[in-house]
């Protein structure tokens, strides 16, 4: 397929090119340059008036709780989403899987419609939960990275005693990892150092929640005398999630020992837990990507996530933040942290992208393309979504 006369954001720095041609072959970007002619029998599309940007990479979701939207709004974080005692856990266990699948599918389709071409799900429910999401995805052409989780959590006494990973769970973990892309660990406060060390030896992607709340940080210190982030690093995660209240020292260590941090600013705000300090994260050398977190709390919308993060960061710190940096968090940085050929328009990478109508009422004229996308664009401005070189939503 040849896409002609399209504006685009190229490469790792999202360089704006006002007019070029994009050749796609075997699901990847083959050539990106002006004056490419179509080969024999090749489909050619004139995309004049459209801006092609990388597909959004939503690096942290929990789509399983799509059935519980806005339940218990006034409860504490633990009361709402704690993996053992939270209302979310109870709802997921008591809901008919048929109903869960319907709302999970709705969330996946919603993400696709909003330009999210890849999402990373921390999948609760063990092997059954993984298989449930995989069944849902047979009908939605979105890329997924499923990080499974054993329904195994330790209490504070077991953590203090550094109780080992139980032998009767080894086979269950092995089976689980065969069906997913890695581990999405709940956190250090549900696992002993020994268990986290055991998880560190698994061969697939590892990620863990850490330092989301002040309470979780104080709990870690109370139980073990150690920082929650330092304990979480025992799992040797490829990336951390949240880090909303991580110290400067924790962030320096995280930058050194992981690929980066996935932040979920709207979810943190919805839980009244504060806002991630992206300035400090950048100063300490952390690569930052974006996620939308629990559907129970938050709509899976990267346009809203970018807009909120951009403005609230400037409002709190009274310092300008480049909208391009925010857009990179939603695209390029996600691919970088995941080490996947996504989130970027570049020769050889997967041909995932969003076609934005530059002449939409809310966008025209686009004097600053990055600002326009970050705080003016929305689902209504999307003409089409492309994954692997195929238009999976809308029409050019």
Image (cartoon, grey):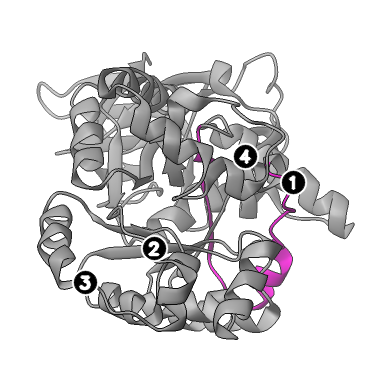
> Which is nearer the N-term, disc 4 or disc 2?
2
Element assignment for label 4: helix
> Which is nearer the N-term, disc 4 or disc 1?
1
Give whichever of 198, 58 is nearer the camera.
198
Q: Position of residue 279 (x, y in %)?
A: 72, 66
Residue numbers of the magenta segment:
271-295
> Which residue does the numbered mark 3 point to in the structure image?
166
Q: Is residue 225 visible?
A: yes
Whether the residues at callouts 2 and 3 have beta carbons within 8 Å, the answer is no
Measured Cα–Cα span from mark 2 to mark 1: 24 Å
Task: Please give left or right for residue 120 compared with residue 70 in the image.
Answer: left
Task: Please give left or right for residue 380 compared with residue 94 in the image.
Answer: right
> Which residue does the numbered mark 1 point to in the structure image?
272
> Which residue does the numbered mark 2 point to in the structure image?
207
Measured Cα–Cα span from mark 2 to mark 3: 21 Å
Crowd class of label 2 (few under 14; some 14 to 19; many from 20; radius 10 Å) = many
> Which residue does the numbered mark 4 point to in the structure image?
305
Q: Nearer the viewer, mark 4 or mark 1?
A: 1
Q: Nearer the viewer, mark 3 or mark 4?
A: 3
Measured Cα–Cα span from mark 4 to mark 1: 16 Å
> Which is nearer the N-term, disc 2 or disc 3?
3
Q: Nearer the viewer, mark 1 or mark 3?
A: 3
Q: Position of residue 262 (x, y in %)?
A: 52, 57
Crowd class of label 1 (few under 14; some 14 to 19; many from 20; radius 10 Å) = few
Q: Is residue 319 visible?
A: no
Q: Nearer the viewer, mark 2 or mark 3?
A: 3
Measured Cα–Cα span from mark 4 to mark 2: 21 Å
Q: Residue at x 51, y 46 (%)?
A: 291
> Which is nearer the N-term, disc 2 or disc 1?
2
Measured Cα–Cα span from mark 3 to mark 4: 39 Å
């Amino acid at each position: 397929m040849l896409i002609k006369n399209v504006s685009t954001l190229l490469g790792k720095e999202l360089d704006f090119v006002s007019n070029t041609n994009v050749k796609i072959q075997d699901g990847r970007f083959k050539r990106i340059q002006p004056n490419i002619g179509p080969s024999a029998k090749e489909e050619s599309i004139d995309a004049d008036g459209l801006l092609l940007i990388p597909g959004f990479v939503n690096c942290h979701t929990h789509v399983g709780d799509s059935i519980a939207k806005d339940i218990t709004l006034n409860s504490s974080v633990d009361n709402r989403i704690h993996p053992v005692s939270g209302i979310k856990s109870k709802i997921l266990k008591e809901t008919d899987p048929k109903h869960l699948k319907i709302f999970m599918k709705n969330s996946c389709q919603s993400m696709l419609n909003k330009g999210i071409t890849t999402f990373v799900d921390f999948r609760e429910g063990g092997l059954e939960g993984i298989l449930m999401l995989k069944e849902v995805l047979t009908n939605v052409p979105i890329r997924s990275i499923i990080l499974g989780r054993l329904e195994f959590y330790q209490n504070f006494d077991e953590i203090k005693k550094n109780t080992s990973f139980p032998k009767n769970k080894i086979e269950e973990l092995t089976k689980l990892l065969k069906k997913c892309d890695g581990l999405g660990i709940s956190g250090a406060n549900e696992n002993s150092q020994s268990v986290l060390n055991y998880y560190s030896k698994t061969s697939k992607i590892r990620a863990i929640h850490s330092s989301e709340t002040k309470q979780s940080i104080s709990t870690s210190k109370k139980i073990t005398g150690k920082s929650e982030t330092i304990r979480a690093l025992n799992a040797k995660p490829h990336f951390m999630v949240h880090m909303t209240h991580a110290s400067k020292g924790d962030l320096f260590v995280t930058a050194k020992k992981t690929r980066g941090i996935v932040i979920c600013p709207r979810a943190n705000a919805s839980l009244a837990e504060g806002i991630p300090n992206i300035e400090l994260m950048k100063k300490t050398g952390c690569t930052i990507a974006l996620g939308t977190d629990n559907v129970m709390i938050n709509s899976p919308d990267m346009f809203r996530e970018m807009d909120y993060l951009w403005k609230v960061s400037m409002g709190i710190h009274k310092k300008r933040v480049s909208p391009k940096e925010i857009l990179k968090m939603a695209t390029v940085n996600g691919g970088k942290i995941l080490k996947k050929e996504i989130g970027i328009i570049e020769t050889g990478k997967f041909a995932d992208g969003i076609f934005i109508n530059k002449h939409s009422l809310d966008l025209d004229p686009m004097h600053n393309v990055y600002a326009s996308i970050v705080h003016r664009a929305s689902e209504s401005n999307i003409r089409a979504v492309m994954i692997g070189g195929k238009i999976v939503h809308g029409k050019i």
